[in-house]
Image (spheres, rainbow, N blue to C red):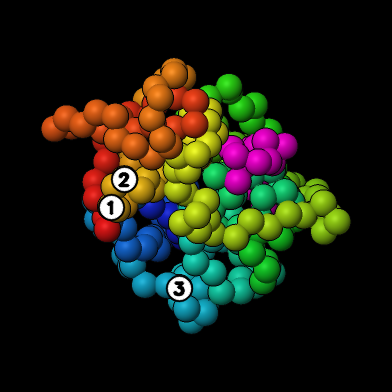
């Protein structure tokens, strides 16, 4: 099957699996990445090695029509943040993957909400692309059981391990999955807006367990920590429940590569961070 792919390095295993299955890539749409916390270098290199055109620009309706005319039978999005123009269902399939158990957890970045407040939405879904984000009929989905200290990174890794096989199976029998797709129940739907700074910020008046929940929800994407008038982006830390006798937010110890800060019932030691304000 000829296909157009929308994604970045996180979704490269899905692309590679489809190539192993002998599907033919016609074009790659990716997006600007900082190549520090999100990456597109490897997926661009894959397109270059294959001699396939790629772009960082958002897709236009004319491009969907062009690749359909070139024989594209599938437009597949995996971790792609932008809206894909309408696809003529009489000529090609439009399929998206989403990191929640739809219709729960619609939105651009649902994982922090799932980890902090909505474990019932944990999973991933493969669904039809429609005019409304994340609202298409469900082709396939799997629930994911969260561990006691699940993080955005471990959750994403679980999805990354399972998605290539699931996509491969769906695409191999796509007409059948398409005809049997289940509409989403709008009464069951929940939509999470992009997380704001408040949601990402450590509150030193909270317990170390509550702060840890924030840290795990954002992981390598970075939490925020106010420290002595500065704002730090935090990518790794340790927590310890202990009596310290200090006011919440007080710096207990500082070294060249770590800062220990008092929380309500313990200490949070920042071990990988950078000042942003």
Q: Dot 1: within a 10 Å radius of its alpha carbon, few (fewer than 14), some, or many (20 or more) residues?
A: few
The quarter of the picture where the C terminus appears is: bottom left
Up the image or down, 28 lies above or below 170; here it is: below
Badge 2, how many Cα within 10 Å: few under 14, some, many 20+? Answer: some
Residue at 67% of width from left, 50% of height from top?
105
Q: x%, y% of residue 266?
A: 44, 24
Q: Is residue 152 above or below residue 85?
A: above
**What residue did someone put label 2 on?**
227
Residue situated in front as seen by the camera: 255 or 187: 255
Q: Position of residue 110 (x, y in %)?
A: 58, 50
Q: Are marks 2 and 3 in contact (CB under 8 Å)?
A: no
Nearer-the-camera pick, 273 or 57: 273
Secondary structure at badge 2 equals strand
* Callouts 2 and 1 close, C-beta under 8 Å: yes
Residue at screen point 86% across, 56% down: 187
User: Label 2 vs label 1: CA separation?
Assistant: 5 Å
Front one among 51 and 157: 157
Which residue of the protein is positioned furthest toward the bottom in this rendering?
62
Comparing labels 1 and 3, the label whose residue is closer to the camera: 1
Task: Specify start and end residues of the magenta stretch as a single range.
Answer: 113-128
Q: Where is residue 69 shown, x and y percent of the image? A: 51, 74
Between the residue at mark 1 and the residue at mark 3, the CA separation in whole angstroms equals: 40 Å
Whether residue 241 is visible: yes
- The residue that label 1 is drawn on is 230
To which residue does mark 3 refer? Answer: 59
Residue in the picture at 24% in, 46% down: 274
Q: Residue at x 59, y 37 (%)?
A: 115
Q: Is residue 62 above or below residue 115?
A: below
Q: Position of residue 207 (x, y in %)?
A: 53, 31
What SS does tag 3 mark?
loop
Q: Earlier in the sequence, mark 2 or mark 3?
A: 3
């Amino acid at each position: 099957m000829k296909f157009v792919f929308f994604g970045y390095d996180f979704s490269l295993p899905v692309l590679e699996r489809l190539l192993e299955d002998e599907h033919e890539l016609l074009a790659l749409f990716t997006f600007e990445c900082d190549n520090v916390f999100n990456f597109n270098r490897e997926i661009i290199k894959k397109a270059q090695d294959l001699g396939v055109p790629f772009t960082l620009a958002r897709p236009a309706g004319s491009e969907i029509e062009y690749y359909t005319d070139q024989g594209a039978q599938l437009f597949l999005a995996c971790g792609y943040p932008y809206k894909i123009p309408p696809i003529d269902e009489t000529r090609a399939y439009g399929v998206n993957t989403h990191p929640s158990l739809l219709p729960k957890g619609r939105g651009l970045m649902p994982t922090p909400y799932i980890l902090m407040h909505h474990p019932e939405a944990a999973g991933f879904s493969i669904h039809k692309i429609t005019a409304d984000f994340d609202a298409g009929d469900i082709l396939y989905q799997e629930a994911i059981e969260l561990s006691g200290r699940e993080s955005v990174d471990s959750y994403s890794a679980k999805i990354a391990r399972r998605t290539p096989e699931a996509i491969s199976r769906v695409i191999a029998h796509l007409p059948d999955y398409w005809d049997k797709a289940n509409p989403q129940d709008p009464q069951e739907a929940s939509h999470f807006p992009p997380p704001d700074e408040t949601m990402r910020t450590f509150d030193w008046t909270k317990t170390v367990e509550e702060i840890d929940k924030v840290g795990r929800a954002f992981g390598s994407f970075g939490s925020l920590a106010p420290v002595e008038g500065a704002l730090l982006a935090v990518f790794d830390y340790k927590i310890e429940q202990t009596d310290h006798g200090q006011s919440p937010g007080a710096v207990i110890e500082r070294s060249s590569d770590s800062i220990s800060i008092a929380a309500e019932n313990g200490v949070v030691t920042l071990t990988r961070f950078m000042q942003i304000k």
